[in-house]
Image (tube, rainbow, N blue to C red):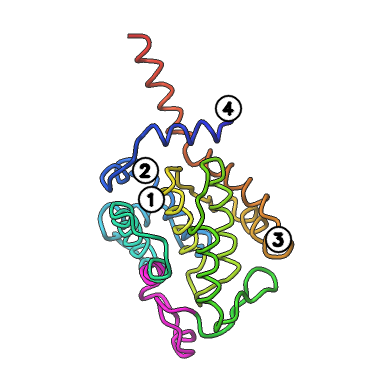
């Protein structure tokens, strides 16, 4: 059994069914995920600020830019929405994606985007660069391409052994479509994790220090249509995300056997 298989087995053993179950098992995950997901695209993000926002709804003696704090507050709101969505088993549809992006980006659009008519919670109205050279889907085809993606992934019964591959495709294709003028990465990472949770698989933190590998894996899909690099990267990140929890589980079981 691989380290990834053991991680999935551990998660399934938690028997996460309710919103309260999920909150319990994501207690440590939530802050690290929010910090790293925001840090990937905003170098001003710090773990200390993320912790303060999640635990105390404020940051003491903050001297940084207001956008970063707003983004972190939005990360917390998105996490709470994720819990609620899981508890209610909200379907992954256009309405869910648009609402999640609105939560993630509320109050963070710069004036240049606003002047172009872009708004949080709305598909993009202009082209924006994706990766090294692509611009994503044309604004007028975004809704259609998102519906096609959802039909391909959500509208299909996914076998347990293929869940991570399906999640990788969902994430890669979503980023390739680039449906919004901002917040696509942050929205896409939460969307991927919600898909995993609905299929009883552990969510993933993509660590900021591995952003080059992450971007390279996405680029492999964008340019060459290769999904394997991202799928393999996500497997590694899953193990890294949960390795300490898995180790604690092993220690606990060992102590129980000694009694």
The first of marks 1 and 4 along the sequence is 4
Q: Which residue is mark 4?
A: 1
> How far is disc 3 from disc 2 in space, using C-alphas?
35 Å
Quarter of the picture containing the C terminus is top left
The first of marks 2 and 4 along the sequence is 4
Contact between marks 2 and 1 (CB within 8 A): the answer is yes
Q: Is residue 121 left or right of residue 207?
A: left
Q: Secondary structure at mark 4?
A: loop
Q: Is residue 64 something that shows in the picture?
A: no
> How far is disc 1 from disc 4 in space, using C-alphas?
29 Å
Q: Is residue 128 left or right of residue 223?
A: left
**Residue 252 covered by magenta stretch:** no
> How far is disc 2 from disc 1 in space, using C-alphas?
6 Å
Q: Is residue 18 something that shows in the picture?
A: yes
Badge 3, how many Cα within 10 Å: few under 14, some, many 20+?
A: few
Residue plotted at (45% across, 59% down) = 191
Q: Which residue is mark 3?
A: 225
């Amino acid at each position: 059994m691989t380290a990834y298989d053991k991680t999935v087995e551990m998660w399934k053993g938690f028997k996460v069914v309710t919103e309260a179950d999920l909150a319990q098992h994501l207690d440590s995950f939530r802050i690290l995920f929010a910090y790293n997901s925001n840090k990937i695209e905003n170098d001003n993000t710090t773990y200390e600020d993320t912790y303060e926002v999640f635990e105390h709804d404020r940051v003491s003696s903050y001297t940084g830019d207001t956008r970063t704090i707003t983004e972190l507050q939005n990360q917390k709101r998105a996490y709470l929405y994720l819990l609620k969505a899981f508890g209610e088993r909200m379907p992954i549809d256009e309405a869910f994606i648009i609402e999640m992006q609105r939560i993630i980006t509320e109050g963070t659009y710069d004036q240049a985007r606003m002047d172009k008519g872009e708004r949080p919670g709305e598909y993009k109205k202009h082209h924006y660069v994706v990766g090294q050279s692509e611009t994503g889907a044309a604004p007028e085809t975004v809704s259609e391409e998102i519906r096609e993606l959802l039909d391909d992934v959500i509208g299909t019964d996914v076998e347990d052994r293929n869940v991570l591959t399906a999640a990788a495709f969902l994430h890669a294709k979503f980023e390739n479509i680039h449906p919004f003028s901002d917040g696509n990465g942050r929205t896409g990472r939460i969307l991927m994790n919600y898909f995993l949770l609905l299929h009883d698989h552990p969510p993933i933190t993509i660590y900021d220090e591995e952003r080059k590998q992450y971007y390279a894996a996405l680029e492999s899909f964008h340019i060459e249509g290769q999904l394997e690099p991202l799928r393999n990267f996500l497997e590694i990140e899953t193990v890294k995300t949960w390795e300490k929890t898995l180790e604690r589980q092993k220690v606990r079981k060992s102590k129980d056997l000694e009694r």
